[in-house]
Image (spheres, rainbow, N blue to C red):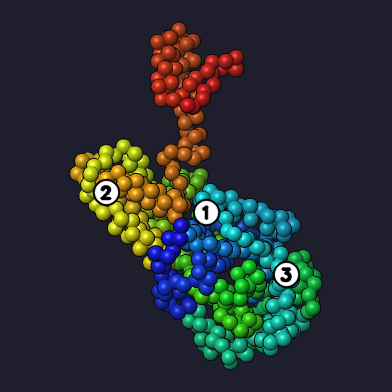
Amino acid sequence: MSLYKDQKIKIYNSLTKEKETFTPIHEGAIGMYVCGPTVYSNVHMGNCRTFLSFDLVFRYLKHLGYKVRYVRNITDAGHLENDGESGDDPILKKARIEQLEPMEVVQKYTVDFHDTMAKFNALPPSIEPTATGHIYEQIAIVENLIAEGHAYEKNGSVYFDVIKFNETHAYGKLSGRKLEDMITNTRELAAQSEKKNPQDFALWKKAEPQHIMRWPSPWSDGFPGWHLECTAMSTKYLGENFDIHGGGMDLKFPHHECEIAQAEASNHKSPVNYWMHTNMLTLNGKKMSKSTGNSILPGELFSGKNNVLGRTFAPSVAKFFMFQAHYRSILDFSNEALEASEKGFNRLLDAYHSLGAIETSDKSSMSISTWKQSCYDAMNDDFNSPILIAQLFEASKFINGLKDGNATITKADLEELSATMKAFLFDVLGLEDTSVSGDESAEKLDGAIGLLIELRNQARANKDFATSDKIRDELREVGVQLKDGKEGTTYSLS
Ligand code: AMP
Ligand code: ZN
């Protein structure tokens, strides 16, 4: 069903700084590219906020019936600190520290990333290409940029000529920076570099002898610059002009600015119609970040082993907490905020579960179709998840009214209400029903039944058959069958 024909989305475009009506290039089909992680360490909750925000976008677009090709890359080479001027490749650095092959580092943290995304119930992207798997495509773009006069070679490395580009294009338009100001601020750096000017950025770097991740190219044995991989992979899988490009705000400059420059210089067209940027998750008011150590890892959240949280929280609770803020607002992470979100989330789940026991009537005292459309309106307005959640709380208030006999609902409306809550809670927000399922609950149940079996064994040993029979019979009443065998007592659930 193509819901998108009735639901018109507006997206805040970071390039124009306006909320714009979203019109895909091809009707019914959307291409979306999101910069993926640089896999040299575990993703932290800040990274997760960005990836989960785009999972929400992906889920909502799919819910509306769009065919979405969602490309999210893995940066497994080339993300150099300081554009290679004085910094190192963090993957190589980590490989040295952990005494691993660089590709072992890549594999270890890619697996961790996938595992984390699965725990958060995020959908896998349609394509997950790697930088090292697209060296050929990156070299082809560099060759084209040199031929177009937008790049130059120096000592086996190739740089993008920003000043030349700016003569005919607007370098800095996404981040709002002016090239003249950048030049004034960096004048003293110019002399130490092989670049024509400090704003130029690396497209290809000649590898030093100790740099083991290297590939042959027309200029040197080396490796591609970081910005190039996203241009190569987005163009290959989504075309020279595609619908949505996303990432965290901190990627606007230089990464996305450079992507725009490369693509415009190479393909003579603007690569992206809607640029979306998520705001930062902070801890103690400061950006969560790998390099400063000001971060909470998802594993620490699930295990409760950290200095910030008093106990464990389920992945869906953390997700609910994040979606209670709009993706373009700063959000501060704290134990108190998570506890409040957990309460709210449980209230919604309780309301949803109680729908099965509601008596219907011949009139509804609330318009379910109006409420349902306000859920869509919230998401159509630049994916406004906090407003959507406020609407779900409105529904839960109404459900409480139904339970108390202060409100009424028809059978058809009850079905509509139930289906809509289910769709938004589980399909669109991608939350999981922590109250009825999940490994954690299964473990708890197993532990509780184990304890009852032990108490029954003690009762039998004491010849207290009244108690042992009571435990067996009452467990059977709630659907737990005990079976006594040679290996001891086991149970099954009916
Ligand atoms: P990285 O692996 O460092 O390239 O980061 C992966 C993604 O996480 C990028 O889109 C970043 O912009 C984003 N990111 C990094 N730190 C945060 C944060 N504190 N809050 C939200 N997103 C972040
Ligand atoms: Zn990127």
Percent across and percent down for residue 64 are 45, 60
Give the alpha-carbon distance from disc 3 to disc 2, as whole Å. 56 Å
Furthest residue in direction top, as rendered:
463
Q: As displayed, is residue 161 above or below residue 372?
A: below
Precedes in sequence: disc 3 or disc 2: 3
Q: Mark 2: which amino acid?
A: Lys
The residue at the point 51 percent across, 44 percent down is 303
Mark 2: few/some/many CA within 10 Å (<14, 14-19, 20+) = some
| Disc 3 secondary structure class | helix
Percent across and percent down for residue 438 are 49, 40
Q: As displayed, is residue 455 above or below residue 412?
A: above
**Residue 122 circle label:** 1
**Residue 135 circle label:** 3
Give the alpha-carbon distance from disc 1 to disc 3, as whole Å. 28 Å
Please name whichever residue, 452 or 52, is drawn nearer the observer in this view of the structure.
52
| Disc 2 secondary structure class | helix
Left/right placement of residue 478 relative to residue 457 reads left
Precedes in sequence: disc 2 or disc 1: 1
Mark 1: few/some/many CA within 10 Å (<14, 14-19, 20+) = many
Please name whichever residue, 304 or 493, is drawn nearer the observer in this view of the structure.
493
Residue 230 visible in image = no
Percent across and percent down for residue 228 are 65, 74
Q: Mark 3: which amino acid?
A: Ile
Residue at image mark 2 = 397
Left/right placement of residue 25 relative to residue 262 reads left
The residue at the point 49 percent across, 73 percent down is 274
Q: Is the distance from the Cβ of mark 1 to the nearest ligand 1 atom less than 8 Å?
A: no
Q: As displayed, is residue 335 above or below residue 465?
A: below
Quadrant of residue 390 within the rendered picture: bottom left
Q: Mark 1: which amino acid?
A: Ala
Furthest residue in direction bottom, as rendered:
167
